[in-house]
Image: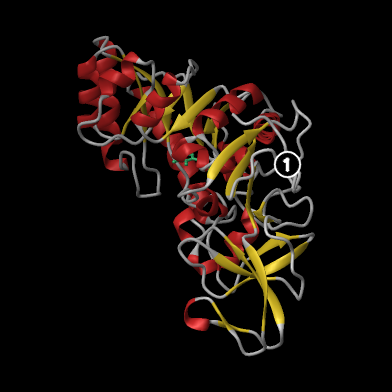
Amino acid sequence: MTDPVPHRAEIVVDVAAIRHNVRILKDLVSVDGPVQMMTVVKADGYGHGMVEAAEAAREGGADWLGVATIDEALALRAAGDQGPLLCWLSAPGDDFAAAVAAGVELTAYTVAELDEVAAVGDARVQLKLDTGLSRGGAPRAEWQELFAAAAAHEAAGRVRVTGIWSHFAASDEPTHPANDAQEADFREALRLAEAAGLDPDVTHLANSAAAILRPSSHFDLVRCGIASYGLDPAPGVSPRLGLRPAMTVRARLLMSKAISAGDGVSYGHTWLADRDTTVGVVPVGYAEGILRAAGNTASVWVEDSLRPILGRVCMDQFVVGLHGELPRPGTDVVLFGPGDLGEPTAQDWAEAVGTISYEIVTRLGGRLARRHVDSERVDADINGADLEGTPT
Ligand SMILES: *Cc1c(COP(=O)(O)O)cnc(C)c1O
């Protein structure tokens, strides 16, 4: 263990991987002509660190950054980002004036929201349409009214309508009929917007899965979140693109010990030793966002092999099977990483617990430390026990 800063448990994010993924995705969507790239860095950059992810994304060629809330957008501005930046999830009472003053583009779903933004004056606003997700966005019955109101505000110089957009319900299932229907409805909405006198700079519909799997949905810009972090938005469907998972989660083994045949492990004894064996204690638990459902299903990487999580994951720790070996306390335990050495990936964890990789990476927190390394700029190996890099 040559790590200069021995953390009990940490998240290590390789910003070079984010740069690389953004570059790959931008090249992919631009094969038939330029398409702008928005890297989505909401939810603390999907758990990777919003500011560091944003910086890496810009370096990789992100024309835009996308976030959910105004608070997230203002945090990016406070960190120095000056580029095009869109947010799309405002709640009543949000500080639109602060967003406008910071040059953040807002999204309106309703005429009421648009009026509120227009009252600030001089706002750049995008209109979000519901084309079939039945979540945020103007429902079809309100499109004409929203476009008319937007055109009127624009004519009066109160807002500039810079974009019109929508969001897919099932882009990770390319043959799902909702995809064709939503894209057709979006095209119809754009015709109605044009007829109402709107001339947005950008129209957009695609998230990561659609960016990768549905070129017809690229329009002027794609909004890529999960793929920017190197995780597959449509496992088993996406082609191999050379994306690289940016996040590694590791901990240090607290102790290892022998147990006897018949011994039960962890709360409720949901795992029983069928022979004499050894187990280790890993000092992270559900307070760190390690899913309790990972007990008896997920595996971790210890001393060059996969080891099962035995019994229930506790609040602060879990028990790992060690196959008769007794590694030293402090031995590196990789929960998941890029997978290069055989360690599990976030996708493996998602499959083990019945969720999606998005949830695995965004829910981490608690007492985990997080550090950023740059494998292209320093001699850093983000996979092994000898992980070194520049803490940021
Ligand atoms: C989160 C989000 C995205 C990014 O989706 P991914 O599947 O992670 O690429 C794109 N658009 C909107 C509106 C979102 O909320």
Name the residue located 45 percent from the left edge and 40 percent from the top edge.
43
Would you place residue 298 above or below residue 174 in this image?
Answer: below
Q: What's the residue type where badge 1 is placed?
A: Leu
Left-right relation of 247 to 169: right
**Residue 254 in picture, x, y percent from top left:** 62, 60
Residue 219 visible in rendering: no
Query: Residue 74 sits in which quadrant?
Result: top left
**Residue 5 in picture, x, y percent from top left:** 64, 39
Name the residue located 57 percent from the left edge and 24 percent from the top edge.
55
- Considering depth in this image, is 381 or 362 the residue closer to the camera? 381
- Considering depth in this image, is 146 or 310 the residue closer to the camera? 310
Query: Residue 224 sits in which quadrant?
Result: top right
Residue behind mark 1:
387
- Considering depth in this image, is 44 or 225 the residue closer to the camera? 44
Would you place residue 389 above or below residue 150 in this image?
Answer: below
Furthest-top residue in this view: 157
